[in-house]
Amino acid sequence: DAGVIQSPRHEVTEMGQEVTLRCKPISGHDYLFWYRQTMMRGLELLIYFNNNVPIDDSGMPEDRFSAKMPNASFSTLKIQPSEPRDSAVYFCASSRTYYEQYFGPGTRLTVT
Amino acid sequence: RKEVEQDPGPFNVPEGATVAFNCTYSNSASQSFFWYRQDCRKEPKLLMSVYSSGNEDGRFTAQLNRASQYISLLIRDSKLSDSATYLCVVNIPYSGAGSYQLTFGKGTKLSVIP
């Protein structure tokens, strides 16, 4: 299996620009998660989907963040407008059940 | 008090040593416990689940102490390849009835030295 695929792997953008992160989960996994990791706050759950439906978005920092899952094989996390404090590594993970999550390689976002 | 707390380390141990990490959690109603491993600049990977009776996987042993609200990870005969950050993960109830959320600790860094 190819594992969870994320793109881009690195993104450098200027404050105020829109950023779109992409994720392809492992085929057959019903759950998809978006996380953000920083040195200060560690790994934080932003949102997760079950069967393409958003279940819990309580971790989404504010309205500038939005996530979609139009089908079982694709999800996006969008930040608009981006701010320097959004700089972090963003991970996508998928799983068959809620547990035993498989993480993608992450997108390292730098907002200047 | 943080929901999931870990000693950040680093733990620097020689090859062949035995090392143990603890992780405490604040909510006694927490269910399901895991250890993940994260190599430098890589994604977290599931190392093992933690069962109530304790469980072992090769050189790794995980324990759960519900009374004191902590889980532990013991690594025997440390290898250079064990160098990584070990993340404690707890399924913690929140807000609505029956709602849980996997919460990650910030991790404990282990360096195994030749």
Image (tube, coloured by chain):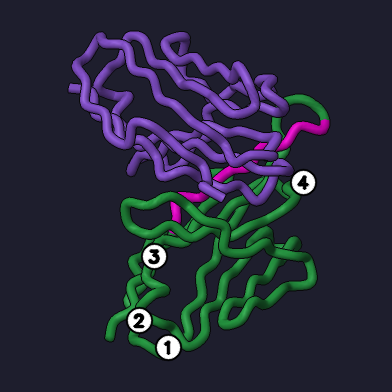
Chain colours: A purple, B green
Chain letter of the residue beneath label 1 in the structure image = B
The residue tagged 3 is B84
Residue A56 spot, x, y in % from top left: 65, 24
Q: Is residue B14 left or right of residue B43?
A: left
Indicate the position of residue A78 as horizontal and vertical percent values: 42, 16
Amino acid type at image mark 2 = Val
Span shown in magenta? B98-107
Q: Circles 4 and 3: CB distance less than 8 Å?
A: no
**Chain under callout 3:** B
Question: Marks 3 and 1, Cα distance to the nearest angstrom?
Answer: 15 Å
Q: Is residue A68 magenta?
A: no
State how far apart marks 4 and 3 are (Cα): 29 Å
Q: CA distance from mark 4 to mark 2?
A: 34 Å
- Say left or right for A22 vs B72: left
Q: Amino acid at mark 1?
A: Ala
Q: Do discs 3 and 1 belong to a common subunit? A: yes
Report which residue position mark 2 lands on: B13
Determine the residue located farthest toward the front in the rendered image: A1
Q: Are marks 4 and 2 on the same chain?
A: yes
Label 4 crowd (10 A; few <14 / some 14-19 / many >=20): few
In terms of secondary structure, where does tag 1 sit?
loop
Identify which residue is drawn at 29% across, 81% down: B113
> Quadrant of the rendered structure where residue B80 is?
bottom left
- Residue A1 is situated, as x and y percent measured from the top left of the image, at 57, 50
Q: Nearer the viewer, mark 3 or mark 1?
A: 3
Is B103 within the magenta? yes
Residue topped by disc 1: B17
Judging by the rendered image, the residue that carries numbered circle 4 is: B29
In primary-sequence order, the first of circles 1 and 4 is: 1
Quarter location, residue A109: top left
Q: Are marks 2 and 3 in contact (CB under 8 Å)?
A: no
